[in-house]
Structure formats: structure tokens, C-alpha cells
Amino acid sequence: MIDTHSHIYDEMFDGDSEAVIERARQAGVEHIILPNVDRESLPRMLALEARHRGYCHAAIGLHPTSVNAGYEQELQIVKKELERRPYIAIGEIGIDLYWDKTYYKEQVSVFRQQVEWALLYDLPVIIHTRDSFTETMQALAPYRNMGLKGVFHSFTGTAEQLLEVMEFKGFKIGVNGIVTFKKSALPEVLKTVGIEHIVLETDAPYLTPVPFRGKRNESSFVQYTCRKLAEIYGLNEAEIDRQTTRNACELFGLQVGEKTANC
């Protein structure tokens, strides 16, 4: 399995980050992708990647909830990082209208700038959409036939919205613990597309799956999302593991052992 979205560099893991990594390895997690938030999260993320190089992989980006009056300085940091060293993806980027709409126009501008950098550097994007699916698709419309690729992180939309994403070639759907929630509509929605369109993620320390809902999430818990997807698609867990890992390998340019994914 590959956890394609995990913030295990967060201070919530300061006391046991190494144990968290070891539990992920023991659970069968072959790689963990670390999306950035802003300049404050960057040093912590890079430090974790350095300690587990080849296992943890940093992405670079400015999260929409961190877009404020000083967004231009934040964007310059992203730009300099892209020039300084390779990253596995550009993210976490997007539009968030749940918490605050004050900087909506700036969010769109920041999002589009980072999409353009993704095209320039031929990198996938990790897209955050919260209460903003229509606005996100409108922002992406100019890039429809330009080879853009990436993942719609933590997808919770309708079947119609899912099919709209699939029409935008090059994108996968990030599925996490939400799919295990009792009242989640996601299991039925996901049946409208095949497993070849899905990648696993946790969004740790958030969105902890059943049976640990309410506790801190971690990358090893991606196995419970895998288990739920096996139930949804009527496949065994090994096949969900293989296919979602293959999907992540193709999208992010990763490689794993032959025993797991045959990427």
C-alpha cells in the first residue's frame, strides 16, 4: 500500500514519529507522501523526509487555508523550493470555502499559479477541495488539455462530480477513512468508477477510519480504507492493495517491491 497523503510530520507526532513510521512499515505501507501546508510546516516535513529518505516523499505547495494577505511571499517560497530541489508533487493546493471566503479570489490565483508550475515541472498536483468543487473545476478548466495530472484528495463529492473528474484525464481519486464512516455516501458513489481510478490516503492525523475514529490517525491505518474498498468492489484486499499501489506508482513515479504491486 501507499499512503498518498499524510501529515505525520505534524507536531502531534513529536513523541512517537519513529514508532508511527515503523507501524506503517509493519502494516505493509511501502511509501508515504507528505503534502506541505505553508512555510511553517516546511522544515518539519523536510526533516522527516530526510530521516526516512526513499520512504517518505515531500510535496511542496501552499494550502488554500494558508492563503492570506501575505500570500505572495508564501508563493515565492514554493517557487524557490521548486528551483532548489526535486519534489514528488505540488500540493497540497486548491480552494477551501469552508473555513473562510475572505481570500477566495487570492485562493484561485494561488491555485492557478501552482498548477502552472506543476505543468512546467511535469509534476502531479494534490488538490484540496472543501465546499468548492464547482469553483475548483472552473479554475482547472483552462488546463483541461494540457497534460495536467494529479489526485483529488479526500474526495467526498457526488457520483456526478466523480464522473466530471474522470472526464478530466490524468486524475485519480484520493480515498481515506471517510469511506468507513457509517453515514458516508462515498461507498455508493465510488461504485460508479473502477478501482483503477483510486489511490489510498489517510490525511493523518485527521479523518481516522473506523474502528479508530475519534483518535489520532496515522499511516498504518490506511489498511482499514483498503479493507473497506475490498468490500465495496467485491475484491480481496490483496487486489485492492496491488491496484491502488500501481495507480500511485504511475501517478507519482514511485517504485515498490515486486511482491506488492508489480509497478
Image: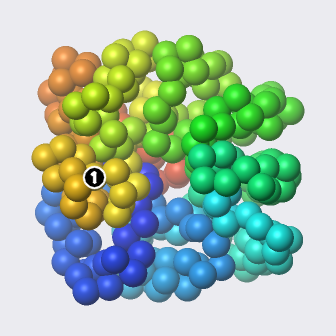
Crowding at dot 1, Cα within 10 Å, few <14 / some 14-19 / many 20+, comes out as: many
**Structure colour scheme:** rainbow
Q: Which kind of residue does numbered mark 1 sit on?
A: Thr
Q: In the picture, which quadrant includes the C terminus?
A: top left
Nearest the eye: 35 or 186: 186
The answer to whether residue 238 is seen in the rendering is no
Q: Position of residue 230 (x, y in %)?
A: 20, 28
Viewer-proximal residue among 8 and 199: 8
Residue found at x 76% / y 74%: 74
Q: Which residue is mark 1?
A: 208
Q: Secondary structure at mark 1?
A: loop
Q: How many marks?
A: 1
Residue nearest the viewer, comparing 231 with 131: 131
State the image quarter where residue 6 is shown: bottom left
Residue found 33% across the figure and 39% down from its top: 178
Q: Is residue 201 left or right of residue 136?
A: left
Q: Is residue 196 left or right of residue 187?
A: right
> Residue 152: x percent and y percent?
55, 39
Residue 46, x across and y down, in percent: 52, 80
Instruction: Give the residue displayed 25% in from the left and 86% down from the top.
Output: 15
Residue sitting at 37 percent across and 26 percent down?
Answer: 186
- The answer to whether 169 is drawn above or below residue 222 in the figure is above
User: Does residue 53 lie above or below 168 as drawn?
Assistant: below
Please tell me in which quadrant of the rendered image residue 10 appears: bottom left
Location of residue 107 with respect to 67 vertically, above or below: above
* Percent position of residue 198, x then y: 42, 33
Between 240 and 54, the one nearer to me in the picture = 240
Is residue 208 visible from the viewing direction of this image? yes
Answer above or below: position of 179 versus 257. Answer: above
Q: Is residue 214 left or right of residue 125?
A: left
